[in-house]
Image: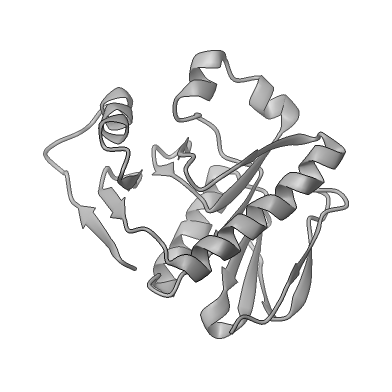
Amino acid sequence: MNSLTLNLDTVRMSDEQFYQLCQNNRELKFERTATGELIIMSPVGGDSGNREAELTIDLGIWNRQTNLGYTFSSSTIFKLPNGANRSPDVAWIRKERWEALNAEQRRKFPPIAPDFIIELRSATDDLETLQDKMREYLNAGIRLAWLINPQQQQVEIYRSDGKVEVRNLPTVLSGENILPGFQLTVPCYS
């Protein structure tokens, strides 16, 4: 993964300080681990950026038709229950859960784990690091997560019961009971 991880053991940032760091450096993309390490993410290339946008569009169209929740882009940082600040490539939260947050919580980095996320492995992403991140999402309460891996022509499906299903591409993914009626066709990638 083309990212830089800074160990800030002796420098603990409050949530507000982390928020201000992100606001003051909008050209950079940050995440923060549960142990306080600061991760500076590199931008993705054209292929990954296009694929990520298409995934967001597909989920967004389904959500507009069903009006069941809210869809979020990779620019959104969520404060997970373990203290980590993460920004999945695509995220979705049920309407009633999102609307239970107050205006200030929704405006900043929402203190909520999405119900559903997609991570798309870019050419420079380390697979094991992404798989660890997927497990972190599940431990945070995410109910369904997809890790799309174009390099190995596979998708890993993570469910709240802890089981991981691996499928070869092409495949059709179901939103199951989390995203009723949502289906995503994932092609083979060149």
The single residue placed furthest to the left in the displayed view is 10
Q: On screen, 121 above or below 160?
A: below
Query: Where is residue 132 drawn, in percent x and y?
Result: 45, 62
Query: Where is residue 101 drawn, in percent x and y?
Result: 59, 20
> Is residue 13 found left or right of 61 in the rendered image?
left
Query: Where is residue 92 drawn, in percent x and y?
Result: 66, 42
Colouring convention used in this rendered image of the protein: one colour
Q: Is residue 36 visible?
A: yes
Q: How many marks?
A: 0
Q: Is residue 178 visible?
A: no
Residue at position x 58%, y 84% in the image: 190
> Is residue 33 found left or right of 45 in the rendered image?
left
The single residue placed furthest to the top in the displayed view is 103
In the foreground, 178 or 74: 74
> Is residue 21 found left or right of 96 in the rendered image?
left
In the foreground, 185 or 9: 185
Can you tell which quarter of the image residue 161 is in?
bottom right
> Is residue 100 found left or right of 151 in the rendered image?
right
Residue at position x 44%, y 45% in the image: 86
Residue at position x 25%, y 48% in the image: 37
Quadrant showing the N terminus: bottom left
Can you tell which quarter of the image residue 189 is in?
bottom right
Query: Where is residue 49 drawn, in percent x and y?
Result: 51, 61
Residue at position x 77%, y 47% in the image: 61
